[in-house]
Amino acid sequence: MSATPERDARRLVRELALSVLCHLESYPASEHAAAIPLVLDAPPSGDGDDEDAFAQLARSTDVRARAEELVALWSTRRDEIDALIESTSRSWRLSRMDRVDRNIVRLAATELLARADVPRAAVLSEAVRLASRYGSERSAAFVNGLVEDLAKRVRPESGAGA
């Protein structure tokens, strides 16, 4: 499958949203709305390339706006999404999951619940891609299994190939 500008944009949006969600864990839930612009306006210090990439994503008006929208969708349904993940995960409580894996699954669950325009297969594929890129060596398999189970619960009418 070849990349399209829209698919590329969605990938960048998910990467920025993942970074924001990971950073939001350092703030109390009551401060998330105020913390989002802080995270986006002050990129984390890093080892050069990743820091520059994050700053570039945060400066892209379209990517930033869409990432903020995705994070806001998660934020407004956080309790519902976290409860869904907890009830779907067979052997891991949300609090015991790796921070990156947990937030990738949160983004995927958000899209499955609130973004009917995004195909189920795209949500799963992108979650696995993020896990492969940013997670541990076991993250992709973990995220794949959990997001697939979430998709079956949230969008059962969508066949496995949808």
Image: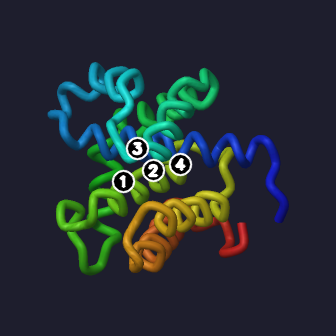
Type of the residue with mark 2: Leu
Q: Residue at x 32, y 48 (%)?
A: 80
Q: Which residue is mark 2?
A: 107
- Tell me which label, 1 or 3, sits earlier in the chain: 3
Q: Residue at x 33, y 59 (%)?
A: 102
Three-letter code, disc 4: Glu
Closer to the eye: label 4 or 2: 2
Q: Which residue is mark 3?
A: 19
Residue 149 visible to an observer of this rendering: no
Which of the numbered marks, if any, corresponds to residue 111? 4
Give the residue drawn at x 43%, y 46%.
18
**Residue flagged by tag 1: what amino acid is it?**
Asn
Residue 73 is drawn in which quadrant? top left
x and y, in percent, of residue 1 in the image:
82, 65
Q: How dense is the environment of label 2, judged by Cα within 10 Å: few (below 14), some, or many (20 and up)?
A: many
Residue 115 pos. (x, y %): 58, 44
Which mark is on residue 103?
Answer: 1
Secondary structure found at label 3: helix
Q: Where does the C terminus fall, quadrant-wise?
A: bottom right
| For the residues bearing labels 4 and 2, Cβ distance under 8 angstroms | yes
Three-letter amino acid code at disc 3?
Ser
Q: Secondary structure at mark 1?
A: helix
Which mark is nearer the camera, 2 or 3?
3
Residue 45 position by quadrant = top left
Secondary structure found at label 4: helix
Between marks 3 and 4 in the image, the one whose residue lies nearer the viewer: 3
The residue located at (65%, 44%) in the rendering is 10
Q: How many marks?
A: 4
Residues tagged 1 and 2 counted as in contact (Cβ below 8 A): yes
- Image-based side of 127 in relation to 81, left or right: right
